[in-house]
Amino acid sequence: TIKEKAELILNGSEKAVQAVLPIADDMERAIENGAKTDDPQVLRDGMELIYQKFMKSLSTLGVQKIETTDADFHEAIAMVPGMGDDKKGKVLDCVQTGYTLNDKVIRHAKVAVGQ
């Protein structure tokens, strides 16, 4: 039992690594092909495709983005004065996206809030 536990701890990230490896392959191809083009739109489109694939892989692992609509559930790193009463206490900008893993917060969103 102890040996099995040790093996689970040692190889526990195997599923996550297997999900990320195809994205690393895509990034390598993008770097190689990026040297062959000067069109910034082509590079942007490629990065967006890789990002979408990465987010889909995270989703299959149980990782989800936290929507930044209610200031009570996020880490406020800035208070922006003079935004009016309708913006008071509301999220104005998301500085860093927050994530959950199987409904447990693993990183709180960092937001700017109206004052």
Image: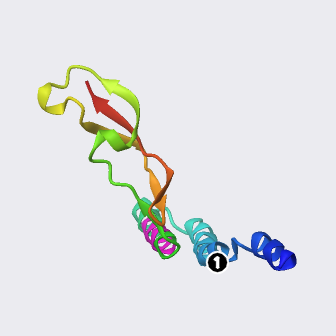
Q: Is residue 27 left or right of residue 84?
A: right
- Reply yes or no: does residue 98 show up in magenta: no
Q: Main secondary structure of the magenta part?
A: helix
Give the magenta range: 48-57
Quadrant location, the C terminus: top left
Q: Label 1 is placed on what type of residue?
A: Lys
Residue 26 lies, in percent from the top left, at 58, 75
Residue 6 versus residue 40 in the image, above or below:
below
- Reply yes or no: does residue 53 show up in magenta: yes
Residue 97 lies, in percent from the top left, at 43, 50
Mark 1, residue position = 15
- For image coordinates 66% across by 73% down, the residue present is 17
Quarter location, residue 18:
bottom right
Quarter location, residue 73:
top left
- For image coordinates 70% across by 76% down, the residue present is 14
Q: Is residue 19 left or right of residue 44?
A: right
Q: Is residue 7 left or right of residue 77?
A: right
Residue 8 lies, in percent from the top left, at 76, 75
Dot 1 falls on a residue whose secondary structure is: helix
